[in-house]
Image (cartoon, coloured by chain):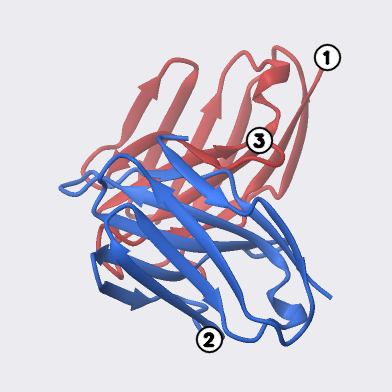
Amino acid sequence: SQQGEEDPQALSIQEGENATMNCSYKTSINNLQWYRQNSGRGLVHLILIRSNEREKHSGRLRVTLDTSKKSSSLLITASRAADTASYFCATDGVGGAQKLVFGQGTRLTINP
Amino acid sequence: DAGITQSPRHKVTETGTPVTLRCHQTENHRYMYWYRQDPGHGLRLIHYSYGVKDTDKGEVSDGYSVSRSKTEDFLLTLESATSSQTSVYFCATVVAGGPYEQYFGPGTRLTVT
């Protein structure tokens, strides 16, 4: 079974609003990563948070990690139409840091 | 796409025929991966390589084989394609030494009729 599970599966918001996506996982991890995939394209790495970190920022992205609850959240602030994409969390740990297990993703739609 | 190309980008083939997909990278990355992406399943690891001639199975390896004779090329072969292998296939690489962010190719859309 997959390590990471995203929630919600789909999210539709208005431009300018904040978008929050959640990821839950099952086993201990070294790192958790978030990726974006635009339609018809490969995944693009957004941000990595280590197991000893609780929060990390990158531009309009804020990631939190709660290892006690085995969960992470990705917050995109002041959303833009260009943020429309699918977002995936990926975790390592079971097979080693070089092997990632991806969740099923959250489809985010930003309405103008 | 971090110097990763995949070929072909699109392929339609018939059930029972062999198919080989190629991943080529120019960054001399040690690790290379093949994933398939299907609706409702996200990305699932098929095989990966941690060096020339060093490969290992992933979550969904049945029906697939791989080869890596050069650092820059990682080949995925479907020995006898089936309709269940219709999917989008992505190659990815990782720089050795961590923190293991993966860089993805543009994908190959394979349809088995």
The disc labelled 2 sits on which kind of residue? Asp
User: x%, y% of residue A92?
Assistant: 33, 59
For residue A88, side relative to residue B80 (left or right): left
Q: Nearer the viewer, residue A64 or B13?
A: B13
For residue A33, side relative to residue A23 (left or right): left
Q: Colour of chain B?
A: blue
Q: Nearer the viewer, mark 2 or mark 3?
A: 2
Q: Which residue is mark 1?
A: A112
**Label 3 CA crowd tier, 10 Å (few <14, some 14–19, many 20+):** some
User: x%, y% of residue A71?
Assistant: 44, 51
- The reply to whether label 2 and label 3 mark residues of one chain is no
Q: Which residue is mark 3?
A: A38
Mark 2 and mark 1: Cα distance apart in space: 44 Å
Checking the image for residue A42, the label placed there is: none
The disc labelled 3 sits on which kind of residue? Asn
Checking the image for residue B62, the label placed there is: 2
Asked whether residue A78 appears in the rendered view, the answer is: yes
